[in-house]
Amino acid sequence: LSVYLMMFGLVSPFVGMALARFSLRPFMALGAAINAAALALAAHTHDIRTLILLYACIGFGSGLLGVVAPITLVSRWFDEKRGAVLGMVTAPIFVLLSPVTTIALLKAGGLHAAFLTMAVIFAILTLLMLFVIDRPPDTDSLSRPALDGTPGSRTFMRQTGFWLLAVGIALMASAGTAFYAHGIGYMMQKGISLEAGTLIFSVFAGSGLIGTLLFGWLSDRIGPVSALILNAAVQLGLWTLLVLVTDFKVLICIAALIGMCMPSLNTIQAAVLAHLFGVKNVPRAMGISYFVKVPFLLVAAPAVGYLFDVTRSYDFAFSVLASSMLVALAAFVAVHFLRIDSEDSSTSPLAA
């Protein structure tokens, strides 16, 4: 999985740059085809080194197909209610369905059946991607300039707000990765049984479907930057409570609320980038943002494990994660004020 994430992160900025110039269709179809081939080969390999290499290929294919490309597609097609549509597209429906399906496949035919089934799904997806239409016929909305008034495609990289946004999202996403890796162990440290801890973790993973739809709707109602600030503020309170609370019922509620906030980050981030820097810059900005995110994702879980080994407790490590929410919140508030400063001109597309 680390190799998968690394490849996904390395390829994302290059995909973003390419999608700004070329059609999405061949990239998405090629990504699905690479995943289909790699998973089909994985079904027949018995060497862990080969499997790791194949997961690197899957990471490459997923970089072509996932996150940057679909978010770019939605951003190009939807101007009104963009947040709500992004919420629907990024809702983790298959994240909920795949564990149960995979367990059934493993029981029925082992790892071979699971890998082959995924290969067939991606083969079908390859055909579907050939029907992708990049943008609506009227693309006038895509020619709007970025807020700094310069039409250059890389002007967003010169803006402090973009980097604050990228680092803040990376901090929050890495906390979610750490919870995925250590959440059950942390619950057991609090005196919760393994079965109950697993239930809490399942609630955390399952509530993301509601969260992506909710925060997508909020992005349209109160603005994407405000929705992001609200998300970070809520998570700061929840992660602080997670450190302090030991009651089982309260922990379930906290895990459910964190699970609602965490998966919606991609949705809100895409809406913020389109809102601040223009739809034309979304693929590049998302790709570079994911590149920034990857080191945080790779380090978070091992760092929490190291702190546990040193202190023999998860308390300090999870307090650090809670503190990272405060840093992210401060970054997003700064982005908000930078955005206000850039809207002074009456010619700003957002002011209009």
Image (cartoon, helix red, strand yellow):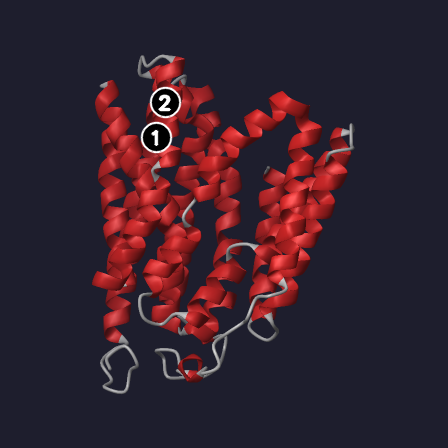
- Relative side of 154 to 253, left or right: right
Against 91, residue 176 (above or below) is above
Q: Kindly identify which numbered label has been placed on residue 36.
A: none
- Is 299 positioned to the left or the right of 113 in the image? left
| Up/down of 7 relative to 127, above or below | above
Is residue 246 something one can see in this rendering? no
Q: Are marks 2 and 1 in contact (CB under 8 Å)?
A: yes
Residue visible at 63% across and 23% down?
108
Going 27% across and 57% down the picture, which residue do you hit? 217
Within 10 Å of disc 1 (Cα), the crowding (few <14, some 14-19, many 20+) is many
Quadrant in the picture for residue 224: bottom left
Q: Please tell me whether mark 1 sits on a helix, a strand or a loop.
A: helix
Residue pictured at 23% horizontal, 22% vertical: 249
Residue assigned mark 1: 203
Q: Which residue was labeled with disc 2? A: 199
- Of residue 221 and residue 126, the one placed in the foreground of this image is 126
The residue lying at 53 percent from left, 40 percent from top is 298
Q: Is residue 312 above or below residue 132?
A: above
Crowding at dot 2, Cα within 10 Å, few <14 / some 14-19 / many 20+, comes out as some
Visible residue check, residue 73: yes
